[in-house]
Amino acid sequence: MKKLGLIGYPLGHSFSKKYYLEKFQKENIQHIDYDLYPIERISDFPSIFKNKDFYGVNVTIPYKIEVLDYLNELSEEAKAIQAVNCIRITHLANGAPYLKGYNTDAFGFEESLKPLLTQNDKRALILGNGGAAKAVIYTLDKLGIKYKLVSRTKQTDNYTYDELDASILAEYTLIINCSPVGTFPNIAESPALPYEHISAKHLFYDLIYNPEETAFLKKGKEKGARTKNGYEMLLLQAEKNWEIWNS
């Protein structure tokens, strides 16, 4: 049986496993399994990909960057982002595994964002500066949208939450939450924005999909902002993964 799976640590509820197993059942796709592989160290990864039944792996926190050391090749977007969430595994004539890394987070984000954009959405604030922000930055660069990172501590050329005011929020109408703030079970939490300055001109995008409407999105909606959660992004990237593994 062919194998697909997700590596990361820890791995609790998994969108990917549920999605692919349901897909296999609905589309009568046989002789393929998708499972979770929680590995405590990235050095345990070879024990998975050396199994010749494996032909594809998803990668999640905390290994999207660390896994780069194990790859033979990177796609164009993965090379630019320097983070990988999808790996296609093939085996050479001598039996050696050959791993190519992709970043389908960028594809999912771009395709779910584009229909929402208006001519006013020229500048974006990216909340959080972790791995998830890398794919967002790549996409905004591609779309020609200028951006600023927002984090709790002051770094070169970014804003802190304390610096955000009415004039900044009037200029940056697209606000993207790439932080884990508001994820289940901490659903009452939201990024520390001055929400009183939000209006119908704003678009709030949250990479979080659980809960369906985060406190961040709820507060934006109350001020008239357009809102979008990360669920469609996940669906799009999942189908892109499948396309890559089976191309």
Image (tube, rainbow, N blue to C red):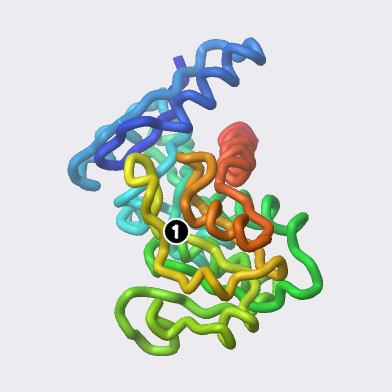
Residue at 38% over, 89% down: 156
| In-image side of 226 versus 196 (left or right) | right
Q: Amino acid at mark 1?
A: Ala
Instruction: Please tell me how many numbered marks the rendered image carries.
Output: 1
Residue 15 seen in the figure: yes
User: Relative to residue 62, is residue 140 drawn left or right?
Assistant: right
For the N terminus, which image quadrant?
A: top left
Residue at (44% x, 45% y) in the render: 99
Q: Position of residue 192 (x, y in %)?
A: 40, 68
Q: Quadrant of residue 198?
A: bottom right
Which residue is disc 1 drawn over? Answer: 132
Q: Residue 241 appears at what percent x and percent y?
A: 57, 39
Quarter holding residue 168: bottom right
Task: Sort mark 1 into few (<14), some (14-19) or many (20+) by Cα contacts within 10 Å.
Answer: many
Residue drawn where x is 53% and y is 26% of the image: 19
For the C terminus, which image quadrant? top right
The secondary element bearing badge 1 is classed as: helix
**Camera-side residue of 85 and 74:** 85
Q: Residue at x 19, y 45 (%)?
A: 41
Query: For this rendering, which residue is in front, 35 or 130?
Result: 130
The location of residue 112, given as percent across then percent down, is 68, 51
